[in-house]
Image: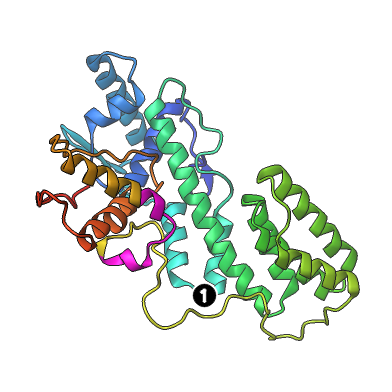
Amino acid sequence: VLIERDGEPVRGFESRKALGLLAYLTVQDQPVPRERLVGMFWEDKTEAQGRNNLNWVLNRLSTHLPGCLQTERHTVQFLGEGTEGTYWLDLDAYEELEALGDPASLAAAVELYRGPFLEGLILRGCPEFEVWQVREQERWSRRAAGTLKHLVTHYGGQGEVEQGLLFARRLLALEPWREETHREVMRLLALDGQRTAALAQYETCRRVLAEELGVEPSEPTELLYAQIQAGELEPLAPGLRSELTPQPPAPGESPFKGLEFFDVADADLFFGREALTDRLVQHLHTSLEAERGERFLAVVGTSGSGKSSLVRAGLVAALQRSVPPVNDTPLPENSHQW
């Protein structure tokens, strides 16, 4: 965590909780209830002790960063502007550069990513903060990886070997199991005349895949390896598009939902959970036919595992398509609200 004023580090943040609290407030970008802050950072204290500690830390923050906080009776908010000027945040700068989308801006954005979010900041006895910190680390790591992937695609496709290799290696440092990036490094090295280094990259790829995922390189990687061994790759002329560079998407709405769930209207795009969907449908129908009155079904799983998609695009869509149960008992009106 680095806090500077006029290019010089700001001293006086001896309390690690003060750093954690400041980081949390800057990311929230909205008023945060004092009760939540007390519970997050002083869970082991009484409510009165926690509030006193919070007030002390807020006072210290306001002393070192005048005007940056708006403290109300029940809430606290980081403003981004204080009595001594505007506070610049690398997170905000990253988002602004990323939104521009051109290669130069994306390259400047990834330069701001210097490692895991709040790396080295450990707050013992603050489990809620730890969970939040890990979640933010994963979010920013994925974001940086996505930006780097765009840069690898751009510079690799343009035949700019030096830049392509630079960003591809940074991407592998974040996600060493990314096989297509290993292939791009192999390809660029070979096209740059570094055949031995390209073959060595294949061995690195094979070792990492075995250690991280327990798998062997895929067929495209093996084919590229064989091409390099046989000396079949010709030098890439400037501006020549890589055969490994993804082609523009076809017109229309993308079937990839990203972090969003598949809803009932997306049922035709929802694949891979047919067996599980059938089990859920059978369970509901069996309960209704037996007239046991069991109208409750819980779907549980870790965050992001696809529960909402399974229920909406799988179960609900299947029930809407199927013949009504034999006892003609209608489904609850809110059966799609999972």
When the figure is inspected, residue 82 is found, relative to residue 149, above or below; the finding is: above
Q: Which residue shows up at 48% across the image and 38% down it?
A: 10
**Residue 165 visible, this orientation:** no
Main SS class of the magenta portion in the image:
helix
- Residue 104 figure quarter: bottom right
Q: How far from the left and from the top, in percent, is residue 129?
A: 39, 31
What range of the chain is rendered magenta? 265-277
Task: Say if the magenta span includes residue 273.
Answer: yes
Q: How far from the left and from the top, in percent, is residue 283?
A: 27, 42
Q: Which residue shows up at 46% across the image and 21% down it?
A: 124
**Residue 277 visible, this orientation:** yes
Q: How far from the left and from the top, in percent, is residue 90?
A: 47, 53
Image position of 185 (left or right of 130):
right
Q: Nearer the viewer, residue 251 or 337?
A: 337
- Residue 221 figure quarter: bottom right
Q: What amino acid is found at the position of numbered circle 1 in the picture?
A: Asp
* SS assignment at label 1: loop
Q: Residues within 10 Å of mark 1 (few under 14, many from 20)?
A: few
Image position of 32 (left or right of 8):
left
Q: Which residue shows up at 66% across the image and 75% down it?
A: 244
When the figure is inspected, residue 297 is found, relative to residue 228, above or below; the finding is: above
Q: Badge 1 is on which residue?
A: 102
